[in-house]
Image: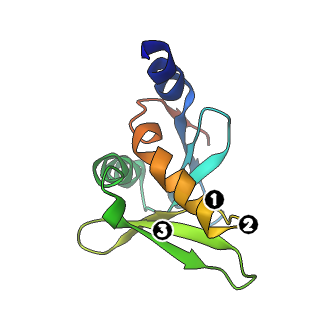
Amino acid sequence: MFETLKSIFGRSKYEVKKNVSGEWYFILKAANGEIVLISESYKNKNGVITGIDSVKLNASDSSNFEVRDSKDGKSYFVLKAKNGEIIGKSETYETKESAIKTINSISNISQTERINYLD
């Protein structure tokens, strides 16, 4: 079991980047490199760290997730803070079940300490 947890935590990561507007955001990636969550934009790196901390806090409670339908009929989810503000959203999935499956694994994935800054 320890090796499994080590594998999940050891390879999942947050990537911090700047968008074309010069604002910061993060991407949470699973151990297999798949994008799990993309954050909202922040004015500075400190805001990004606060956002990552919020993911770690809120991802453990499935009631903070909301599965939605995209315009093309696919599913995605948003993660909300306790105040209802959206922290981030997922990419789209072919089925609602696939989105829910990812929600069920994000609690563990989100606890990684790996943060890569990509400018």
For label 1, the crowd category at 10 Å Cα-Cα, with few meaning under 14, some 14 to 19 and many 20 or more, is some
The residue at which mark 2 appears reads as 94
Q: Judge by depth and name the residue closer to the eye, 67 or 49.
A: 67
Residue at image position (69%, 64%) is: 93
Name the amino acid type tagged 2.
Glu
| In the displayed structure image, the side of residue 113 where residue 39 appears, left or right | right
Name the amino acid type tagged 1.
Ser
Inter-mark Cα distance, 3 to 1: 14 Å
| In the displayed structure image, the side of residue 78 where residue 57 appears, left or right | left
Q: Identify the element where label 3 is drawn.
A: strand
- Residue 31: quadrant of the picture: top right
Inter-mark Cα distance, 3 to 2: 16 Å
Placement of 109 over or under 8, stated as above or below: below
The residue at which mark 3 appears reads as 78
Name the amino acid type tagged 3.
Val
Residues under numbered marks 2 and 1 in contact, where contact means CB atoms less than 8 Å apart: yes
